[in-house]
């Protein structure tokens, strides 16, 4: 199996390409492959699939494409290749070995080419890399804005490789080959000055000077006519070199990775060291990071680039920077400078004048000539580097201003900065190109362990090694500390240490060795934060779930959403939290444990805050999703209303929130149960009832059983009755009718005991449903009629409409179509159309089936079609299937069959 992005987006198998179908499905595949092995949110996928405003059913369309793609991959035996399309929360991830993806193999071949000592070997690697291209990147896909950017980036990488191959040919003296290669590409990209300059030099070195000069003048005129600009320095330098009749560097003198055709840098004055090299040693045991290394190489290819490696403490920023810096010394013939700016060190930052003095001395300035002021020293540094090709590595920078002072002056110099902060000011002022660094994948983490412990020890316990990598959260610092502990204790097993680390209470302590460790690194980051951000971080550690929005963060910290968002932005800038989607943040597991240790005494207060936030938000969601429904309106006695509660624009938004937050709501309810806050636990669970009703067969019973435990622990008859009624109904939908009836029979009496007539009515309805399924139709009709009377007496139209809907269906089952029609019409008279779309659809379906039973086929078909249309508009596919199935029993119309099958496919895609 092979995934292709470098040409038409496709999946190649032993039997040929998979039939991917429409362009949007190829777009979905492309988006997942571009972030292979990383979750891609539904929002990001939506941006990739639609150029303008996406349709309201965008999520359903995406789910349908994902379902079809899963089926195609499964049919091609994807599992045997280690390929999996998985759902992760509100995102999807395509897990696949990098060797199966042509774009990854392309990058790997480029990396190998840069590592070759001789140009002949580099040529072989570069030609193989370019042979992977079968046409323009991402062809055949509908290119939304993110995919257009990705396709452009891939094409830029291809063109840079073409230029690199031409230079490698030149190093071998094969200038005719270089010229032939570049002529075709220049025809396709006539405004790309670097290609034209390379072609000019190749033609000149091949003895075709007149053609080279003609190429310059043609390109100059084209730039003036099309863009209104003059040639840049690359074209101008190449033209000047040709006019002088100088052949440029001799064959073999310019390495294939050298950037651009400009003449060699002017040599430094006599007496200065050449080249300078202040780099620390290359990191040992470095593993993975091929993508980031390639990204650094791309970022370093521009004019006077500033490359910015950012990421959280302990993620390996310095190791990455040094690994890259040591790989290609020939790129920097005038040397490499390094300074640890100690932006997050307990020792404090060095004085800028001291850093500049070290740089100037290394560049050959005598001690007496080093200026005493920072501005003067920085100016001299820029002057000395103006015509050199240097690498300047600025490690552990805390702010943009410090970096700006230390930037070299040469257009051929590269500055590589690492920081725990995003340094957005540097991006804005100096076009710094960020290369964000995330945690290691599990395989790379185990490889790092093997590099320290030896492969034999890791291969002896592969499962334990992977578990250790997971417990360390893929954080290289944590993995190195773990490896150091094991290296010093050869009799310890990896499984034993994994068992120790599994206990969250002691995990951070185990990940500290001497003065090195995760907690120490995080402490140095936190000490530079403002107090409000530290307070927010400490409270985030006590959240039972894994994701936060500004409302939840405010509830935890006892602030408001505006203040919480500002604190979250500060934490994100320091890479202590990660924004996974607009307004959605997560904490790394080890950061969460450290945050929890900052203020352990506030744990219960923070938990109650977030529990009450969940109750308030779930109440708002339930009220928006199902106006008039009121499953638990009595709030806890000590309930603390949050400073602000999220608003929901419509039912779709409310249901989306309930679906997205399901996992975190479950974790929060469990934490409430474990903390003895049962009055919150059952409410948080029960308030998800609109989603439970909508997706009844979605494994809700374990969560409702937890709610039942909480209700009984509280000895709350009201809560127990409500939970039993909902749990019994869910069990009925799951086909567990015997269990359901045992629970539902107890619910009405408990509701009467609690003085909850609406709860009794709901319990009677659910009991009647299961009784009807078990064949006790008269008893079911009687209980449903009692529910109608109770709801009517309480003036609750919502519950009365529900009871009439089921009573109508029971009359229809009992072959009493007139009574069914009367009940259904009475129910329709109760509910406003915009609030009861799903229920109206079910009632209209009963009306239609009743008319069919009475022999009134025209009215029956009309009403069933109307019921299906209302269900389709509401996104209620189960209701649409029910109505359309009834229509198909009396009509063979093709559009009924088509709509029925489409609704079934949507249900299958969401399951």
Image (cartoon, rainbow, N blue to C red):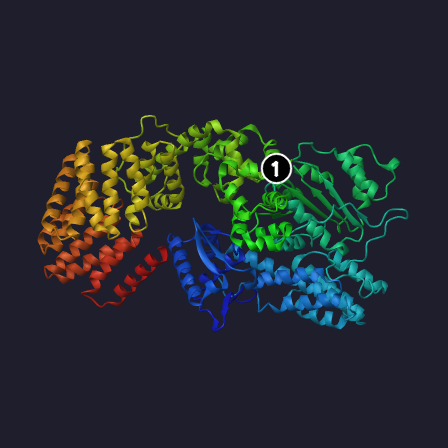
x, y percent for residue 362: 82, 43
Name the image quarter holding residue 398: top right
Q: Residue at x 84, y 53 (%)?
A: 266
Q: Residue at x 37, y 38 (%)?
A: 670
Asked whether, in this view, residue 364 is left or right of residue 726, the answer is right
Question: Dot 1, crowdedness within 10 Å: few (<14), some or many (≥20)?
Answer: some
The residue nearer to you, when weighing 678 against 460, is 460
- Compared with residue 32, is residue 548 higher up or lower down, i.e. above or below? above
Q: Residue furthest front?
A: 491
Q: In this view of the protein, can residue 150 be seen by the observer? A: yes
Asked whether, in this view, residue 867 is left or right of residue 384, the answer is left
- Compared with residue 158, is residue 492 higher up or lower down, i.e. above or below? above
Name the image quarter holding residue 857: bottom left
The residue nearer to you, when weighing 852 against 758, is 758
Q: How many marks?
A: 1
x, y percent for residue 128: 64, 68
x, y percent for residue 897: 27, 65
Q: Residue at x 67, y 36 (%)?
A: 343
SS at badge 1: helix
Q: Look at mark 1 in the image and give the residue it sits on.
A: 521
Name the image quarter holding residue 890: bottom left
Q: Residue furthest right?
A: 270
x, y percent for residue 188: 64, 67
- Compared with residue 96, is residue 431 higher up or lower down, i.e. above or below? above
Asked whether, in this view, residue 669 is left or right of residue 255, the answer is left
Q: In this view of the protein, can residue 191 be seen by the observer? A: no
In the rendered image, which quarter contains the C terminus? bottom left
The residue nearer to you, when weighing 748 against 477, is 477
């Amino acid at each position: 199996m092979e995934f292709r992005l470098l040409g038409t987006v496709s999946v190649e198998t032993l039997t040929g390409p998979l039939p991917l179908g429409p362009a949007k499905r190829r777009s979905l595949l492309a988006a997942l492959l571009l972030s292979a092995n990383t979750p891609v949110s539904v929002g990001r996928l939506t941006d990739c699939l639609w150029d303008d405003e996406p349709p309201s059913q965008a999520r359903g369309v995406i789910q349908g494409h994902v379902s079809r793609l899963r089926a195609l991959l499964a049919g091609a035996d994807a599992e045997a290749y280690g390929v999996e399309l998985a759902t992760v929360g509100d995102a999807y991830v395509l897990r696949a070995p990098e060797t199966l993806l042509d774009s990854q193999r392309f990058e790997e071949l480029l990396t190998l080419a840069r590592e070759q000592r001789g140009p002949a070997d580099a040529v072989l690697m570069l030609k193989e890399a370019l042979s992977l291209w079968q046409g323009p990147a991402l062809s055949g896909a509908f290119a939304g804005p993110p995919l257009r950017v990705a396709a452009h980036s891939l094409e830029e990488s291809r063109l840079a490789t073409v230029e690199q191959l031409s230079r490698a040919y030149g190093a071998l003296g094969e200038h005719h080959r270089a010229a032939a290669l570049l002529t075709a590409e220049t025809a396709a990209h006539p405004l790309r000055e670097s290609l034209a300059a390379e072609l000019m030099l190749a033609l000149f070195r091949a003895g075709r000077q007149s053609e080279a000069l003609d190429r310059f003048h043609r390109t100059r005129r084209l730039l003036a006519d099309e863009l209104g600009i003059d040639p840049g320095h690359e074209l101008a330098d190449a033209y000047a070199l040709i006019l002088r009749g100088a052949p440029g560097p001799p064959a073999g003198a310019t390495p294939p990775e050298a950037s651009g055709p400009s003449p060699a840098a002017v040599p430094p004055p006599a007496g200065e060291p050449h080249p300078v090299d202040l780099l620390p040693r290359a990191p040992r045991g470095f593993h993975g990071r091929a993508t980031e290394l390639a990204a650094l190489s791309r970022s370093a290819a521009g004019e006077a680039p500033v490359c910015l490696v950012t990421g959280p403490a302990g993620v390996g920023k310095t190791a990455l920077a040094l690994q890259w810096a040591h790989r290609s010394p020939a790129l920097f013939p005038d040397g490499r400078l390094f300074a640890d700016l100690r932006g997050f060190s307990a020792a404090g930052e060095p004085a800028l004048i001291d850093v500049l003095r070290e740089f100037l001395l290394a560049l050959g300035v005598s001690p007496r000539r080093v200026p005493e002021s920072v501005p003067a020293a920085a100016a001299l540094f820029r002057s000395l580097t103006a015509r050199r090709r240097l690498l300047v590595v600025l490690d552990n920078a805390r702010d943009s201003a410090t970096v700006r002072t230390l930037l070299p002056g040469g257009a051929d110099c590269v500055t590589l900065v690492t920081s725990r902060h995003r340094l957005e000011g540097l991006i804005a002022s100096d076009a710094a190109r960020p290369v964000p660094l995330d945690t290691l994948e599990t395989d790379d983490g185990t490889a790092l362990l093997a590099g320290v412990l030896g492969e034999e020890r890791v291969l002896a316990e592969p499962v334990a090694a992977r578990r250790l990598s997971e417990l360390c959260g893929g954080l290289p610092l944590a993995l190195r500390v773990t490896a150091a502990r094991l290296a010093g204790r050869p009799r310890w097993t990896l499984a034993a240490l994994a068992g120790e680390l599994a206990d969250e209470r002691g995990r951070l302590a185990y990940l500290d060795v001497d003065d090195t460790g995760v907690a120490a690194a995080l402490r140095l980051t936190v000490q530079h934060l403002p107090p409000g951000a530290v307070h927010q971080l400490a409270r985030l550690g006590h959240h039972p779930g894994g994701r936060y929005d500004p409302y939840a963060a405010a509830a935890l910290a006892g602030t408001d959403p505006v203040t919480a968002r500002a604190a979250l932005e500060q934490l994100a800038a320091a890479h202590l939290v990660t924004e996974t989607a607009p307004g959605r943040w997560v904490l790394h597991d080890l950061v969460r444990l450290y945050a929890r240790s900052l203020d352990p005494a506030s744990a219960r207060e923070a938990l109650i805050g977030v529990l009450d936030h969940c109750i308030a938000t779930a109440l708002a969601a339930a009220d928006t999703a199902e106006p008039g429904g009121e499953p638990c309106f009595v709030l806890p006695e000590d309930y603390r209303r949050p400073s602000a509660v999220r608003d929901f624009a419509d039912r779709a938004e409310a249901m989306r929130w309930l679906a997205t937050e399901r996992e975190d709501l479950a974790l929060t309810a469990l934490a409430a149960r474990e903390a003895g806050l049962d009055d919150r636990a059952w409410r948080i669970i029960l308030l998800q009832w609109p989603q439970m009703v909508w997706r009844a067969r979605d494994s809700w019973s374990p969560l409702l059983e937890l709610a039942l435990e909480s209700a009984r622990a509280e000895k709350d008859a009201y809560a127990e009755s409500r939970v039993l009624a909902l749990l019994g109904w869910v069990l009925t939908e799951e086909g567990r009718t015997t269990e359901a009836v045992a629970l539902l029979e107890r619910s009405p009496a408990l509701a009467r005991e609690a003085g909850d007539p609406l709860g009794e009515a709901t319990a009677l309805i659910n009991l009647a449903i299961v009784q009807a399924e078990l064949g006790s139709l008269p008893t079911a009709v009687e209980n449903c009629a009692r529910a109608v009377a109770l709801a009517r007496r309480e003036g609750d139209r919502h519950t009365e409409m529900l009871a009439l809907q089921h009573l109508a269906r029971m009359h229809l089952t009992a072959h009493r179509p007139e009574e069914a029609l009367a009940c259904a019409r009475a129910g329709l008279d109760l509910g406003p159309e915009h609030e009861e779309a799903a229920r109206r659809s079910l009632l209209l379906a009963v009306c239609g089936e009743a008319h069919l039973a009475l022999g009134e086929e025209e009215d029956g078909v009309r009403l069933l079609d109307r019921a299906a249309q209302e269900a389709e508009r509401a996104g209620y596919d189960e209701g649409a299937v029910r109505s359309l199935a009834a229509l198909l029993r009396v009509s063979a119309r093709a559009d009924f069959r088509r709509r029925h099958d489409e609704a079934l496919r949507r249900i299958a895609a969401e399951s």
